[in-house]
Amino acid sequence: MPTESTFLLAGLFLLLAAAGWIMGRFGERDVQEAPPPLNVDYLKGLNFLLNEQTDQALEHFLKMVRVDDKTIETHFALGSLFRRRGEVDRAIRIHQNIIARPDLAAEQRDQALYSLARDYQKAGLLDRAEKLFARLSQGSRYQVQALENLCTIYEQEKDWEKAIEAGQQLEVLGGRSLALQIAHYYCELSEAAAAGGDYAAARDYVRNAQAGRPRTLRGALTRAHIAQETDDNKTALKLYNRIIDEHTYLIAEALPEIVAIYEREDRLGELDKVLRTMLGRNPEMSALIAYTAIINEIEGVPAVDESVEQYLLNEPTLAEFVDLDELKEGREQGIARVRRALSKIAARSPRYQCQECGFSSQRLLWQCPSCRSWETQRPAQRVQFDTLLQHSITS
């Protein structure tokens, strides 16, 4: 049975046929022979469509309609329709058919090349799309759109050097700032360099990320990680503490690293004092510390353990699933049991969510895979207690 999209395509064919007939019947003509009226050829093409013989319909249409000044927009519309429907092979054939015309105007050729590049991108043929977009980025009326698409392709290919170059050109031509986006490109290079042990290059990339641009959260964390990996723990702790002070919600990323440093240096007692000082300045941080401790299984630091206990005993939603009075009686053992259960639940629950589109993930992703926005994910601040309905709190 024909689908709704088949009827839409058939409708487009009939409209195009009728438009062509009207133009031929009433429009000005430079040739003696009048164009054929709406005839059996259109009905034949329509019959192909209604029987879902789209390939035959496409062949029939391309043979019927010449690519000339009166029909070229028809071809562009049809190609765009096929691409939106996911039938990129057909879209590619249509746009290649337009480009093959020897007397095609320069503006129309650019339009056809841009449409074909989008077809290739949609089909995942990124190398072909890149070549066409690169060509269009040099002086065509599609410069800005081509550079935008090149940035997207370079992000997918993780070719950050080219992404930086395209982004900087786009800033000049597009008249808008891409400071955050370009900063992340540099951070990607920095993290790759650090992973390869080239910490000098990693530091240079971070400096470039923030040179003349607003400071990014990622840049600060990357600097702290580099300091930590090069055993500059003093600098690392200073940076982690600054991150928490300026962006409290990033405690989920910073606290586990801080604990690891103090534990490695056998200074957990000193960490307890540091955390109590933080809590004295900002008591609301207690819940964030508790949540971070639960999902990362951080124990043995009195200030942390007290925050977890307070969190569990004062969480109103938890009272629906746990007898808090009973929990208080067997305090130490009961809290440890609930804490372990929540840690297991948190391990299976999304920890971060994009503020733009709502995409959730287990770990912090600097670029949202769904909406492609940069630095829009934020960590959850509470355990998702509704999942307790599916899990036993005593397991």
Image: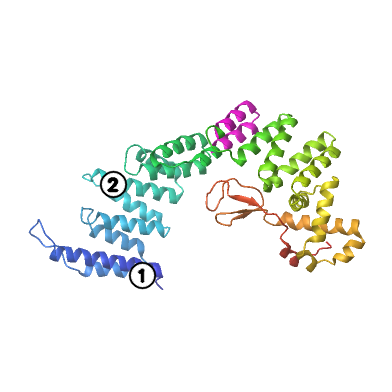
Q: Which residue is mark 2?
A: 99
Quadrant in the rendering for residue 9: bottom left
Contact, mark 1 vs mark 2 (Cβ under 8 Å) = no
User: Is the magenta region chiefly helix, strand or loop?
Assistant: helix
Residue drawn at x 53%, y 40% as measured from the top left: 158
**Closer-to-camera residue (360/178):** 178
Q: Is residue 201 magenta?
A: yes
**Closer-to-camera residue (195/34):** 195
**SS category of the residue bearing label 2:** helix
Q: Which residue is mark 1?
A: 7
Whole-number angstrom distance, CA of label 1 to CA of label 2: 28 Å
The quadrant of the rendering that contains the N terminus is bottom left
Residue 232: % across, % down: 73, 29
**SS category of the residue bearing label 1:** helix
Judge left or right: residue 135 versus residue 151. left
N-term-proximal mark, 1 vs 2: 1
Q: Is residue 328 something one can see in this rendering?
A: yes
Judge left or right: residue 310 versus residue 346. right
The quadrant of the rendering that contains the C terminus is bottom right
Question: Is residue 67 shown above or below 177?
Answer: below
**Closer-to-camera residue (287/335):** 287
Q: Say which amino acid is labelled 1.
A: Phe
Please provide the residue range marked out in magenta.
185-209
